[in-house]
Image (spheres, grey):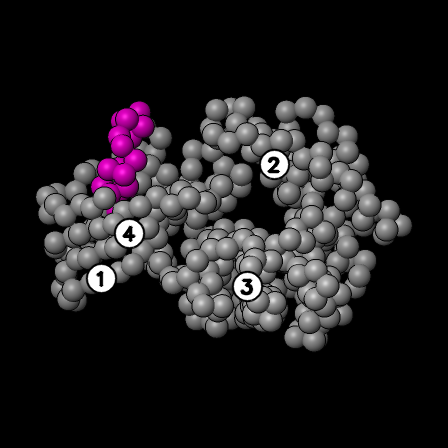
Amino acid sequence: MSDRSSSDPAPARAAGSAAMDAVDPAVQVLAGLRQLILDAHPSAQGIALDGLLRSAGGLSRENWSFDATWTDAQGAHHHRLMLMRDAAGTLLHTDRARECAVLKALELTAVPAPKIFWMDEQGQRLGAPSVVMERMPGVCDYMALNGPGPLDARLSLAQDFLALMATIHAVDWRALGLGERLGVPEGAPSLRDLAHWEGEYRKAQLEPHPELDYVLSWLRRRAPQAEALVLVHGDFKPGNALIDQGRITAKLDWETAQLGDPLEDLGWVTNPVRKREHQIPGHWERREIVQAYRERTGRQVAEADLLWWNVFSCWKLSIIQLTAVAEFVAGRYHRVFQTPTWLYRPMFQMMEAAS
């Protein structure tokens, strides 16, 4: 779908209004994008938005790709862009301004991440909080490490992902001013994260879950201190990256980024329930991943601390699933999710191993 009209843009609409609900989503997106361009470039002429396409994927946000062209006092512009717009129902409640702050800071680093163009923080233009960013080359493949590719190529990619994690954790967040924007944890980041996700748990809880309460109590008693305070991605996985010809071209989905314990990311990729995404059986498993991280960062990575973050990862995933259930019951989410009973056994097994 394209929009090549040069008439005055549609006026801004309040997020969630009945008028916007009645508008075709593509028409609404085109009108909102044109207004964002004019907000940023008041002298823009001949605005063209071509190839608008809503892509599959994204459980909490809509993904729209398009090409934007216009002319202004600085000359002609042509950009390949991606719109990330909050969906009506969500698995994660996140802040677009925080995400944009992280991405703008990363432009000054070696981390491959999309450049931010515009933000509609309150959804006044696009009907829901949104971010427009550079559309980078590559494809998203959750199973890139365990797909049909040659073993040596997959091992090389796995090592590249580990190196990218280490690069993110080495970002000088103080020099980039991210402490002011993201907030520096007071005390152990593990306790901060636990408190945050307990809050999400209580908001999503529709019935008693004694198993999750038991795990929460265990996590609270054993919360570790952090060996370092770093920029954490918060959802580090191949499915949140773009890969082009065996090379990682972009790390995506920074909405859960924060300042925290580096073992949060390492605990996510060594979490046993995510083995198929992050590990290559017999070649790139927990031992190899942890050893490679130690060698790249010089950190000790205490096994007891890492195990805590493994349990926390499963507990956090449980809360995300309960959020999806609550959103579906409320009529805001179209997909049916099961309650997270399948996660109880691996959590209890890890907790027993830690005794």
Give the residue at x 61% y 67%. 151
Q: CA distance from mark 2 to mark 3?
A: 31 Å
Q: Kindly indicate whether the residue at mark 4 contacts the one at mark 1 (C-beta within 8 angstroms).
A: no
Q: Position of residue 25 (x, y in %)?
A: 30, 35
What amino acid does circle 1 point to?
Answer: His
Give the residue at x 66% y 39%. 318
Q: CA distance from mark 1 to mark 4?
A: 11 Å
Q: Is residue 80 visible?
A: yes
To which quarter of the image does residue 213 belong?
top right
Q: Disc 4 or 3, which lies upstream in sequence?
A: 4
**Disc ID at residue 78:** 1
Q: Disc 1 or 4, which lies upstream in sequence?
A: 4
What amino acid does circle 3 point to?
Answer: Gly
To which quarter of the image does residue 218 belong?
top right
Q: CA distance from mark 1 to mark 3?
A: 35 Å
Magenta segment range? 18-33
Report crowding for label 4: few under 14, some 14 to 19, many 20 or more residues within 10 A (C-alpha). Answer: many
Secondary structure category for the residue under label 2? helix
Q: Disc 2 or 4, which lies upstream in sequence?
A: 4
**Disc ID at residue 66:** 4
Q: Nearer the viewer, residue 231 or 183?
A: 231
Secondary structure category for the residue under label 3? loop
Read off the residue under disc 2. Answer: 321
Q: Nearer the viewer, residue 215 or 135?
A: 135
What amino acid does circle 2 point to?
Answer: Gln
Q: CA distance from mark 4 to mark 3?
A: 30 Å
Q: Nearer the viewer, mark 1 or mark 3?
A: 3
**Disc ID at residue 149:** 3
Q: Main secondary structure of the magenta part?
A: helix
